Image (cartoon, helix red, strand yellow):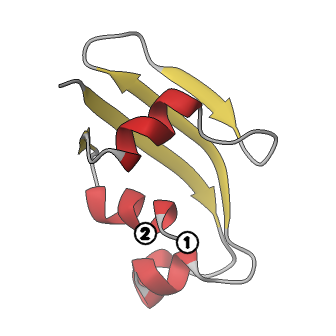
Amino acid sequence: MSVLHLDFETASGVDLKAVGVENYVRSLDFAATCVGWAFDDENPKVVVWPDTSLPPEVRQHIARGGVIKAWNAAFEFNVLNL
């Protein structure tokens, strides 16, 4: 099975270190500004949010319980589970 490498870039008016990841992503002004991903050794792709959504192949991989690698996986998990 392929490995999805995933990275979100975000913005918020609250300080992530001060409030923690769950409060940060649930802040009223939180926004995911872009997401980068790649499967296995593919070249990375990036989409700007909120102009688009996660690509179907990324959503399908996540939905079927595929392996996801991220530098700070707890952060990506929280963004995905808003």
Amino acid type of disc 1?
Answer: Leu
Residue 33 x %, y %: 68, 49
Seen at 50% across and 48% down, the residue is: 8
Quarter of the picture containing the N terminus is top left
Seen at 43% across and 69% down, the residue is: 78
Quarter of the picture containing the C terminus is bottom right
Q: Which residue is mark 2?
A: 78
Determine which quarter of the picture holds residue 12: bottom right
Q: Does 68 sit above or below residue 14?
A: above
Residue 76 x %, y %: 40, 57
Q: Does 67 sit above or below residue 55?
A: below
Q: Residues within 10 Å of mark 2 (few under 14, many from 20)?
A: some
Question: Looking at this view, is 40 or 19 the one in front?
Answer: 40
Seen at 55% across and 74% down, the residue is: 25
Looking at the image, which residue sits at the far right? 51
Q: Does 45 sit above or below residue 42?
A: below
Looking at the image, which residue sits at the far front? 64
Determine which quarter of the picture holds residue 13: bottom right
Q: Which residue is mark 1?
A: 82
Q: Residues within 10 Å of mark 1 (few under 14, many from 20)?
A: few
Q: Does 50 sit above or below residue 27?
A: above
**Distance in Å between CA atoms under marks 2 and 1:** 6 Å
Label 2 with label 1: CB-CB less than 8 Å? yes
Q: Secondary structure at mark 1?
A: loop
Res. 18 mark: none
Determine which quarter of the picture holds residue 7: top left
Q: Secondary structure at mark 2?
A: helix
Question: Looking at this view, is 19 or 27 the one in front?
Answer: 27
Amino acid type of disc 2?
Answer: Asn
Residue 45 x %, y %: 53, 20
Question: Looking at this view, is 53 or 79 the one in front?
Answer: 53
